[in-house]
Image (tube, rainbow, N blue to C red):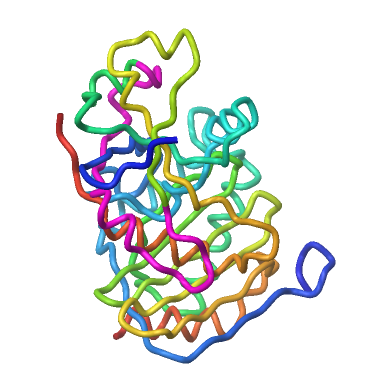
Amino acid sequence: MEELQDGVVFRLATVKHDFPPDSSRLRFWHFELSQNDRSHAEKTGNPPRLSVFDSERTTVAQALAIRGVDQESVAFGLRVPEIRVIRVASLDPLRVVRDPLETPLAEMPGAGGHCGIEGLARRPGDPKALVRELRVRLSDLSFPFGS
Amino acid sequence: MGATGHPAKQWVLPDSAAAPEGAEDTVLWDDYLRRLGEPDGPLSPARAKQVRALWHLLEKRLGPPLKPPAAGALENDGFAMSWDNGRHHFEIEVTAVGTLDWFYMDRDSDARNGEEDQPLGAISPGLISQLRRTLTA
């Protein structure tokens, strides 16, 4: 699986039920693996990955279409080198890897940019606090991302 | 004892102060809380009621006006709140099973603090102390 070393990925966050609704950054709860993320991992046999898109291969509009969500979702960017250098105690470093979608989504424009952040799933024995810190560190790196 | 019937997990690492974030208008926050459990809201009515009760308890213990946090509903009917103030981060999560976790970290040191699986109706002195220090740092 190809691991990204550089560039910017973006994540679509549903913010319509957030307070305040116009946050300029992701919050820790936006890094919770969704049921979709976990289902995708089970289907593919891969580790659970947080869904993001490579900004070099996918536009925000394409990502919104792929995810089937409306403009209530907002894109936030994360620089891959900054993600890669986060270190939290005994947790493995985060990895950003290409994560091919399944058909029919795989045939949509921009689908080739789908990636996943590995390392956010809490493993048996991992203290919950470490995963919480990891999410905070990650959210601190986020920034508003246009198209 | 945690609300799940198991001993409440507790961990306390090096001590520190803390501080907040999210100086949002209290009126908007109150309206947000009120709408959480409405038919088009993100939480079940029961969970929304628990979240409002938790907020009122926090206000009572900390003394109003308590600065509104950044907040969001979780996919599993949980709820999250956070206060950030520079190096200080404080968060509360109402979990899917109706317990409470809280977590504090100082971004510039190893100071961490928190508790897990706490009953919603019994806010610990540790939570109050750390949140107060967060808000006043």
Residue A90 left/right relative to A19: right
Considering the image in quadrants, where does the C terminus of chain A appear?
A: top left
Considering the image in quadrants, where does the N terminus of chain A appear?
A: top left
A35 lies above or below A108: below
Q: Using the rendered image of the protein, determine whether residue B70 is visible from the camera's viewpoint.
A: yes
Work out whether residue B97 or residue A41 is closer to the camera in this orientation and state it. Answer: A41
Furthest residue toward left: A146
* Figure quadrant of residue A138: bottom left
Identify the residue at horizontal 40%, vertical 21% (top origin): A67
Q: Position of residue B97 (x, y in %)?
A: 71, 52
Work out whether residue B126 or residue B116 is closer to the camera in this orientation and state it. Answer: B116
| Residue A82 painted magenta | yes
The region drawn magenta spans A66-94
Work out whether residue A59 or residue B125 is closer to the camera in this orientation and state it. Answer: A59
Q: Position of residue A106 (x, y in %)?
A: 41, 14
Identify the residue at horizontal 23%, vertical 49% (top origin): A79
Identify the residue at horizontal 27%, vertical 39% (top origin): A9
Q: Position of residue B76 (x, y in %)?
A: 60, 41
* Figure quadrant of residue B21: bottom left
| Residue B120 painted magenta | no
Furthest residue toward front: A1
Residue B115 left/right relative to A94: right
Exactly how many numbered labels are in the figure?
Answer: 0
Q: Using the rendered image of the protein, determine whether residue B55 is visible from the camera's viewpoint.
A: no
Furthest residue toward bottom: B15
Q: Position of residue B117 (x, y in %)?
A: 69, 66
Identify the residue at horizontal 58%, vertical 35% (top origin): A46
Residue B78 left/right relative to B136: right
B128 lies above or below A25: below
Work out whether residue A91 or residue B79 is closer to the camera in this orientation and state it. Answer: A91
